[in-house]
Amino acid sequence: MSTRLALWWALFAASVKMFVRNRVAVFFSLFLPLIIMLIFGVLNFEGSTTISLGIVDEADNEASAALFDGLAEYDYLEISEGDRQAELAELEEGDRGFVLVIPAGYQPLLGADTGLVAYAATSDPAQAQVAQGLLQQAISAVMSDSLNGSIPDVPRLRPPVTFESVESRDLGYIDFLVPGIVGMTVMQLGLFGVAFGFVQLKRTGALRRLFATPTSPAYFLSAQVASRLVLGYVQVAILIGIGIWFGLQMFGSWLVLAVIIGLALLIFLAVGFGVAGWAKNEDQAAPVANLISLPMLFLSGVFFPRDAMPELLRSVTQFMPLTYVNEALRGVMNEGAGLVDLGPQLLGMGIWAVITFVIAVRLFKWE
Amino acid sequence: MTSPSTASPGAATPAADHPPIIIVDALRKRYGDLVAVDGVSFEVAEGEVFGILGPNGAGKTTTLEMIEGMRPIDEGSAVIDGVDVRRDPREVKRRIGIQLQASAFFDELTLVELLDLFGRLYGHAVDPMALLAEVELTEKAKSQVRTLSGGQKQRFSIASALVNQPRVLFLDEPTTGLDPQARRHLWALVRTLRDRGHTVVLTTHYMEEAEELCDRVAIMDGGRIIALDTPQALVDQLVGRGFTKTRVERLANLEDVFIDLTGHELREED
């Protein structure tokens, strides 16, 4: 028994070594997600933010004029003015990111609600969340400037703006992006890290060589699965670690996160070994792997929120495995959701895990 | 029905002083309508080098794989070292070493790591360096398999087949794709292994190789053995049937010229 365990452990260690020494596999499974994260998360988005802000001034007094002028000094705010109806219509059209309503009789007082209400476009909550933070900052700064003259020690202002239809947590795009990248990475690990490596062993005959020994190849298969499971966790940990360095916030439990990632890994490892077990060579595996992964890459909300998608498409793609994974990951990381809150997503993932496992077992052929 | 059509029954079975270590009887394999192996029978004596020859698709590899326990046997039986392959393929695999036609390994592992791993797969502790020394690959011990040349790969493949100190060694086209120097090098290795007491069963497309190495050869075609004897006896039978070569046998051939000009020394790009 202990020699069998030693054998299994040796196969496991060999599987890990083979993966780590395979530069192509390491690049695609670790560095590619990192690069995508950098491009989407840091270079592209956060650097070039301008917020289109419509102001509806219903107060039309000195205080509202001061707020208006103060906000106009911020370069990242593109300000236009109009009446409530017109501005809200612009918002609906997508021509405004926010509409700020300054209520009649507006007068900023310390410790009192300002009565400011901002309407945010719901089409892009991730962007809205970043923009909301910036807007809030700008308004706070303008208000403390105007109050600073009379009061030397500026106390904390009440939240100056009430935001409509935007969640109150202060989330950045990085908070939206990292869970999506984690989901994507798990999927890619299963489909490309596993399927291609394994099909190659099949095609070259390296797998057949194991048949020439008295050891059942099931040992090798289980060691492969286990090694990929562990490597998947390591990869996800690295990605999240780098995300945290870039300001990623984690509101939920790490244990819940680990459970979700484990389930996601099981789903996509089953898909990967299913494809690898079915395909005779890489030429067969590639189109199938792409056919499975590409729709999910773009329709499961990896990079962009799914709310922007047409209703029909959204309801269909709601049932894709990666959609459940991404929703669950964002639920725990962005909203601090627990296992119970994530019931529907976990159920969806569980059903997919069973489906993919059964299919993988049915399709699997050693040769 | 299953006895090979040979005029020399004395050599069709192994010499009496060497008991057979492989007994193959009426082996048959069918893929749909195609009968790949159609009633193959032969015996191999302990310490013998036995060759299976034949054109592509003759059923050589399928025959080997059934004997090795790598492929299910449809009909007939194979017994190696007293173990029935159909009954206990795992026990057979414990006693034999196999070099596959396309010898692939886990490319990212070093030779030492692989031999160690293969040892474990047999439940044996192995001395990787001693095995590598046997096939003259000591200097490649820490290299990954993907850096080996064709000849080195074949030699490593044989080293991997020796980890369990097998009684019988199966080599499927061990010299295909090798240059004449590497081929001669491998012949020398096979002779060394035979001298050390391993029984060797090999397939080849090279008649010269079969003449050089094999004590007896079986010639297969269409899934059957159509001749089985020592190489010399087979040649004698042919001549006895009145065969004459259209051209008089030359004293040397082009391969002799090639080896004479380029030498026996191995050429292997590292």
Image (cartoon, coloured by chain):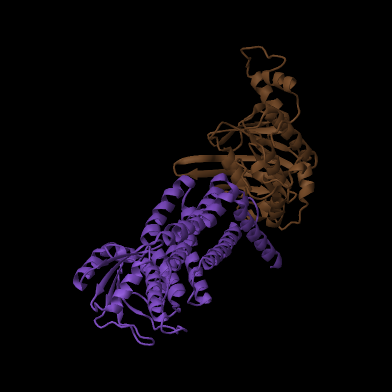
Residue positioned most to the bottom = A111
Asked where in the image residue A308 lies, by quadrant, the reply is bottom left
Give the residue drawn at x 27%, y 76%.
A101
- Tell me which chain appears purple: A
Q: Nearer the viewer, residue A196 or A181?
A: A181
Q: Nearer the viewer, residue A62 or A5?
A: A62
Q: Whole-percent x and y of residue A183?
A: 46, 64
Give the residue drawn at x 39%, y 55%.
A294
- Tell me which chain appears brown: B
Asked whether residue B93 appears in the rendered view, the answer is: yes
In the rendered image, the vertical position of residue A181 relative to residue B67, given as above or below = below
Q: Whole-percent x and y of residue A226?
A: 58, 64
Asked whether residue A366 appears in the rendered view, the answer is: no
Q: Whole-percent x and y of residue A247?
A: 50, 68
Q: Nearer the viewer, residue A77 or A261?
A: A77
Q: Is residue A355 left or right of residue B9?
A: left
